[in-house]
Structures are given as structure tokens and as C-alpha cells.
Amino acid sequence: MSLVLPENDPGVEIAVRLRRACEAHESELSSHLENVARFSCELARLAGLSREHVQQIRYAAPLHDVGKLGIPIRTLTKTGPLSPEEMEIVKQHTSIGRRILVGSSWPVIQCAERIAYSHHEFWDGTGYPEGLSGENIPLDARIVAVADVFDALLSQRSYKPAWSHEHVLAEMWRLGGIKFDPSLLEIFLGNLPKIEAAAA
């Protein structure tokens, strides 16, 4: 996905500039943001969303963790697992993201707000920040949740090694109906070769 700023769409320009801020804050996540954007876009298209909504997700999905701009970088890049106290700090990124994005009149920023705030809600209601469940979770946030976790598990981080493709697939299937919307997960994994090829 090109980062060339489009003409006559201030909302998209804001989204692109905020993405650049995220990349500057955590430079190692640049490829992750790109992958999440591409995977989310393909899943949204296959799920039957309108072309307009798919395009909104294309630019909004990389802002899913924009709230991490308000989290200390030493916490985000810590080697090894986070303590319970540190994990609670990191969880605040959903609410921080909403505060950054809330109140916009531009559809792509409204989409980004929903994603940033709700992409850690779980289908079974055990996620955060509000414990929403099922279709009470915004659709675009449910889409990005699948793409985000899939790419994150495949990627090396300061706190974990990259998982094998087979291990990731097994874990994603296990979390269907728990963490992920099972219908969206089935679309994503059932079309994975096509999605990965389109996102390459």
C-alpha cells in the first residue's frame, strides 16, 4: 500500500501522517502495519463490505495501535514477558487511541477510532476495554483483530520469537469463537493463500 498522500481527502491524509508517527515511535513495526492493512483490506473485501468501507479500512487499520504513542517505549520494547503491572499499562493504548481519534468528521478517522478502541475485544466477551462480545464489537475492529494477531504471531518481537506458519494456523483456529468472530476467521483462513498472495 502506497503512502503517497491522496488529493482532496483530509481524513486519509491525517491517517497516513498518524501512521508515520506510529512507525517513528516503533520503527520495527513498519512491516507489521503494512501487513495488517493489506490482510484487513482483503478480508473486508471477501466478507462483502462495500468498496468505500474497504478503502476506509485500508487506511484505518494501521492505526489500530496508535494509542501506543502514549505508552513508554521502554515498556513496548522490553525483552521478555511483561509484568502484570506493565500489561495493564499497555492495555491503556486502546483508550488512548480513542482519545487521539475521537470526534472526527472524516469517515476514515471514525473507522480508525472504532478499530483502535475495540480491536482487543473478544468474541466471547473476555477482551478489553469494555468486555464487548459478538456482533456488539464493531465489524471493522473484528476484521483487524484477525489480521493483527495473524501477523503478530508470525513476527519476531522483543518479547517472543516468530511462530511457524503451522503453529499460527493451529492457534488461530483454536481461538475461533473465543477471540475471533468465527465467520470472519473461516473466511480468512479458508482463503489464506489468496489473501497472502494479494497482500504480497
Image (cartoon, rainbow, N blue to C red):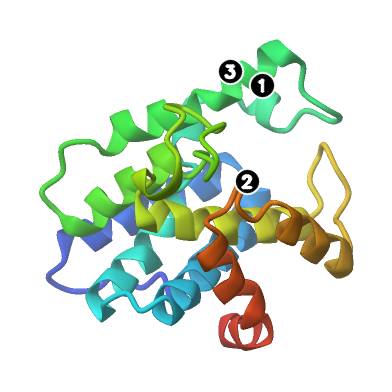
Residue at figure coordinates x 68%, y 17% from the top left: 86
Q: Which residue is mark 2?
A: 178
Residue at figure coordinates x 58%, y 80% from the top left: 199
Mark 3 and 1 residues: CB-CB less than 8 Å, in contact? Answer: yes
Q: Position of residue 126 (x, y in %)?
A: 56, 31
Report the side of 57 relative to 74 (left or right): left
13 or 164, which is in the foreground? 164
Decide: is 123 above or below 187: above
Decide: is 14 above or below 189: above
Q: Please, what secondary structure does the residue beneath circle 3 have?
A: helix
Quadrant in the picture for the C terminus: bottom right
Amino acid type of disc 1? Answer: Met
62 or 183, which is in the foreground? 183
Residue at figure coordinates x 48%, y 45% from the top left: 119
Amino acid type of disc 3? Answer: Ile
Decide: is 114 above or below 10: above
Q: Position of residue 34 (x, y in %)?
A: 55, 65
- Mark 1 or mark 2, which has the lower sequence index? 1
Residue at figure coordinates x 39%, y 34% from the top left: 97
Say if residue 31 shows up in the picture: yes
Decide: is 156 above or below 8: above
Q: Which residue is mark 3?
A: 89
Amino acid type of disc 2? Answer: Ile
